[in-house]
Image (spheres, coloured by chain):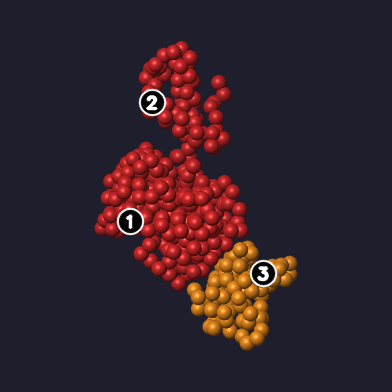
Chain colours: A orange, B red
């Protein structure tokens, strides 16, 4: 399934993450801002890509603003944004 | 043991991830009133992930799904049931048919997931006049029903009256629910006390609920959990008396007596039953009798 429309999920509150997703042709672009970017940036991006893959998203532009969220929260917000972007929410 | 049950809004990560360290015996992840219609999907996924990845050892997980007159409840159960919650709180339960409809869908999911029958319990939330009048039928509508739960906010709206701290307007509902639940052999839990800043009020309200026969009480604030736990725990005097009762019964048996008195009162079956309940709860809390 493709991302057919712009969608977002989550909030900018502490312990949450805000995720925006939009259609993109032939590429999966992940942009991350995180308060723990230096230590965990690579791990968070890997998690984001893994969730997108599980959701069947091969091409999209994704922006994640992490406000100190746990992995299970980041996973939830990325999945919600992807479902919304696919029109499945 | 569910002395206290703390509601946590289903789309608030900050509260969800701290739910296991707020002192309540159970937490209720709320997918219903605490979540706006536009965020139902997000909350469902967030609660599912929280249950899947977080360790809530020692704290029972309950999920309040959306009511069966909404388009959300089956999707809630699809996401939540694989995480094996202790109980599903079913809001706005008005009739036995509501319970049976939810029970049938949960049974179907349990079979698909390979769970034993009735692995996941059901706790109907009684918050309408119809629900109060049908309380016994609701409590006995399915083997899955483990408890009734009183919701006073919606109930008072349905009764066209104001909710007060004194709670006279819910007196009938409280006693009716306790009677129905005990007759059906299930537990019964009291509505939250909504003034989060009234420390004396929560203590009084919880004490009154306990005196009526409720098994525990829900809370919308972590601040109330301590008072509720205290009220619904046996006191040291209760525990000591319970052990004295059991000692007296043992002595009567040893001496071949059919009846025995303790502190000038005859010990009969209800007193023994209460003593056994007190000791069971004390043991679950790691409490024992005083040093002699």
Residue picked out by circle 1? B97
Asked if residue A62 is positioned above or below residue B218 in the image, the reply reads: below
Same chain, labels 2 and 3: no
Point 65% across, 86% down: residue: A26
Q: Position of residue B21 (x, y in %)?
A: 57, 50
Asked which quadrant contains residue B206, the reply is: top left
Q: Which mark is residue A47?
A: 3
Asked if residue A59 is positioned above or below residue A45 in the image, the reply reads: below
Q: Chain of mark 1?
A: B
| Residue A33 visible, this angle | no
Distance from the alpha carbon under mark 1 to that under mark 2:
37 Å
For label 2, the SS is helix
Residue extending farthest bottom: A25
Q: Chain of mark 3?
A: A
Q: Position of residue B65 (x, y in %)?
A: 44, 60
The residue closer to the viewer here, B243 or B124, is B124
Crowd around label 2: few <14 · some 14–19 · many ≥20 (10 Å): few
Q: Position of residue B271 (x, y in %)?
A: 40, 27
Crowd around label 3: few <14 · some 14–19 · many ≥20 (10 Å): some
Point 49% across, 63% down: residue: B78
Question: Mark 1 against mark 2, which lies toward the viewer?
Answer: 1
Residue extending farthest left: B160
Question: Mark 3 against mark 1, which lies toward the viewer?
Answer: 1
């Amino acid at each position: 399934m493709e991302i057919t429309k712009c969608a977002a999920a989550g909030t900018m509150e502490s312990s949450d993450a805000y995720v925006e997703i939009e259609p993109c042709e032939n590429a999966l672009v992940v942009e991350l801002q995180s308060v723990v970017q230096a230590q965990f940036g690579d791990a968070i991006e890997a998690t984001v890509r893994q969730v997108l893959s599980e959701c069947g998203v091969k091409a999209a532009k994704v922006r994640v603003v992490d406000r100190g969220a746990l992995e299970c929260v980041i996973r939830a917000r990325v999945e919600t944004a992807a479902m919304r972007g696919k029109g499945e929410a | 043991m569910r002395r206290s049950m703390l509601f946590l809004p289903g789309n608030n990560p900050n509260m969800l991830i701290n739910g296991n360290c707020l002192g309540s015996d159970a937490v209720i992840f709320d997918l219903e009133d605490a979540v706006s219609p536009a965020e139902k999907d997000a909350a469902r996924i967030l609660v599912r992930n929280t249950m899947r990845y977080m360790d809530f050892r020692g704290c029972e997980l309950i999920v309040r799904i959306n009511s069966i007159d909404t388009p959300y409840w089956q999707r809630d159960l699809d996401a939540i049931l694989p995480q094996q919650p202790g109980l599903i709180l079913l809001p706005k339960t008005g009739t036995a048919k509501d319970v049976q409809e939810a029970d049938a869908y949960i049974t179907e999911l349990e079979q698909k997931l390979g769970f034993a029958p009735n692995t996941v319990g059901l706790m109907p939330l009684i918050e309408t006049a119809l629900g109060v009048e049908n309380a016994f039928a609701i409590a006995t509508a399915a083997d899955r029903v483990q408890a009734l739960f009183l919701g006073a906010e919606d109930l008072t709206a349905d009764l066209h009256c104001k909710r007060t701290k004194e709670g006279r307007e819910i007196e009938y509902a409280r006693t009716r629910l306790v009677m129905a639940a005990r007759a059906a052999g299930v537990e019964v839990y009291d509505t939250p006390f909504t003034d989060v800043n009234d420390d004396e009020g929560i203590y009084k309200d919880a004490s009154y609920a306990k005196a009526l026969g409720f098994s525990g009480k829900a809370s919308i604030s972590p601040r109330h959990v301590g008072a509720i736990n205290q009220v619904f725990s046996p006191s040291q005097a209760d525990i000591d008396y319970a052990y004295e009762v059991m000692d007296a019964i043992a002595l009567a048996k040893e001496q071949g007596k059919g009846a025995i008195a303790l502190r000038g009162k005859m010990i009969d079956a209800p007193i023994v039953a209460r003593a056994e309940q007190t000791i069971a709860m004390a043991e679950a809390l790691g409490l024992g009798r005083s040093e002699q």
